[in-house]
């Protein structure tokens, strides 16, 4: 066979795009120095999260425990990836500012914002008795205590954000659905009608603000069931109806992969949904499709911990295919798919 004639190279055939340069992340010492030059009496302690697009350190500022979040961006490493702009820092801080002091929606207190070094200083939630929902899940210690608060807070966030003045986001609705819907497209490669229908909905409903990163790694909870949301850098103007199902998709994912038992998982989802419904109606059909799309998105473990083995991946794929193939459009029926 003449390979050159029948096979097209996977290397991009167009000229590589010229992306704006993202400065490399400052290392711990330089970041501490940069903050001291700004006039802060601050000492950086251990890293809470290190990655190639952001670093978060616990720190002590004037004797108080705080966190320092320093953001960079990234150039796509393959054509299915997005360009991530370090200006996500500005989006994150804008949302935090919009919500400071809001008694219905709790976010960390923003103490300082330094846009020139894309760095913010916030209250340290670990010292306020909070822990990450993600850690509870991995410790097999997931508590359904927070379900009602999470549902109510997502509902309130949905409504409150409709009053916000539009600010620039780094992710558009098109980018977001393109990224999160990729695995759904690949699951129905011939017509892609399942994806195209959702893409249309996500893009057309872009009048309001949407936060698709409402996953357990961005939610702090405490023993009293109180909740704090963090990490809004990649929020955008898109379909708000995606926020709740994208959160609950992660409860389904961690149930099907063996971290949460199906009893508590179902109870959490039911409580969260009914709390949200007290604030904002739910279109159950779109809810089921968005949730299954997110399960497909994570089925190979993309940007998520804990999805490692073939049994886990197959369970997630089976769930996604069942929702779309059987046209499941009621939350009650969706919950039947996570029976033991
Ligand atoms: N206000 C905070 N208090 C305590 N820990 C925090 C706070 N903000 C972030 N963190 C820690 O840093 C991690 C990453 O922060 P996040 O804002 O989600 O950044 P990223 O965009 O890199 O996901 C969180 O999962 C949490 O462990
Ligand atoms: Mg995060």
Image (cartoon, helix red, strand yellow):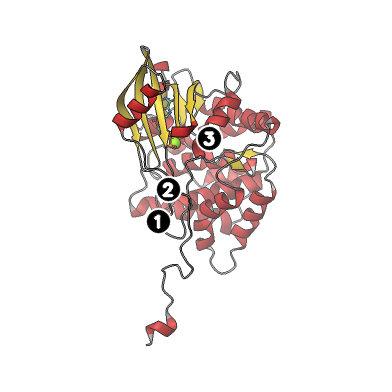
Distance between mark 1 and mark 2 Cα atoms: 9 Å
Disc 1 CB within 8 Å of nearest ligand 1 atom: no
Splitting the image into 4 quarters, where does residue 242 fall?
Answer: top right
**Farthest bottom residue?**
1
Assign the C terminus to one quadrant of the image.
top left
Above or below, 87 against 202 in this view is above
**Secondary structure under badge 2?**
loop
Sequence-first tag of 2 and 3: 2
The answer for how far apart the CA atoms under marks 2 and 3 are is: 16 Å
Residue 135: x and y in percent read 37, 31
Q: Looking at the picture, does residue 102 appear above or below residue 272?
A: above
State yes or no: discs 1 and 2 in contact (Cβ < 8 Å): yes
Mark nearer the viewer, 1 or 3: 3
Q: Measured from the top left, where is residue 18 in percent x and y?
A: 48, 57
How dense is the environment of label 1, judged by Cα within 10 Å: few (below 14), some, or many (20 and up)? few
Q: Which residue is mark 3?
A: 90
Q: Name the residue that disc number 1 marks.
A: 77
Residue 139 in view here: no
Cβ–Cβ under 8 Å for marks 1 and 3? no
Front-lying residue, 179 or 68? 68
* Quadrant hosting ligand 1: top left
- Helix, strand or loop at label 3? It is helix
Q: Is mark 2 within 8 Å of ligand 1?
A: no
For image coordinates 43% across by 82% down, the residue present is 6
Residue named by callout 2: 74
Quick one: label 2, few (<14), some, or many (20+) residues within 10 Å? many
């Amino acid at each position: 066979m003449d390979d050159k004639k029948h096979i097209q190279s996977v290397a991009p055939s167009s000229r590589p795009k010229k992306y704006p340069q993202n400065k490399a992340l400052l290392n711990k010492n330089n970041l501490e120095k940069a903050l001291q030059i700004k006039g802060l009496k601050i000492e950086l302690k251990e890293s809470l999260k290190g990655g190639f697009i952001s670093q978060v350190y616990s720190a002590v500022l004037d004797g108080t425990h705080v966190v320092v979040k320093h953001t960079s961006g990234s150039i796509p490493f393959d054509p299915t990836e997005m360009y991530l702009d370090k200006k996500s820092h500005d989006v994150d801080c804008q949302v935090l500012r919009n919500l400071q002091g809001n008694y219905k929606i709790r976010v960390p207190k923003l103490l300082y914002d330094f846009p020139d070094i894309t760095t913010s200083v916030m209250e340290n939630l670990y010292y306020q008795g909070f822990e990450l929902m993600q850690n509870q899940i991995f410790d097999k210690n997931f508590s359904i205590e927070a379900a009602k608060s999470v549902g109510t807070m997502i509902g309130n966030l949905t409504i409150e954000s409709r009053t916000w003045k539009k600010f620039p986001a780094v992710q558009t609705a098109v980018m977001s659905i393109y990224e999160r819907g990729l695995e759904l497209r690949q699951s129905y490669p011939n017509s892609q009608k399942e994806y195209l229908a959702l893409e249309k909905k996500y893009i057309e409903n872009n009048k309001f603000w949407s936060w698709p990163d409402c996953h357990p790694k961005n939610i702090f909870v405490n023993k009293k069931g109180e909740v704090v949301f963090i990490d809004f850098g990649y929020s955008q103007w898109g379909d708000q109806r995606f926020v709740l199902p994208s959160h609950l998709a992660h409860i389904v994912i961690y149930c099907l992969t063996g971290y949460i038992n199906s009893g508590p998982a179902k109870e959490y989802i039911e409580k969260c949904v009914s709390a949200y419904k007290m604030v904002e109606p739910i279109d159950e059909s779109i809810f089921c499709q968005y949730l299954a799309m997110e399960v497909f998105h994570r089925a190979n473990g993309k940007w998520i911990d804990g999805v490692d083995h073939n049994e886990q991946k197959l369970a997630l794929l089976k769930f996604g295919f069942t929702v779309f193939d059987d046209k499941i459009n009621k939350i009650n029926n969706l919950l039947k798919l996570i029976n033991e």
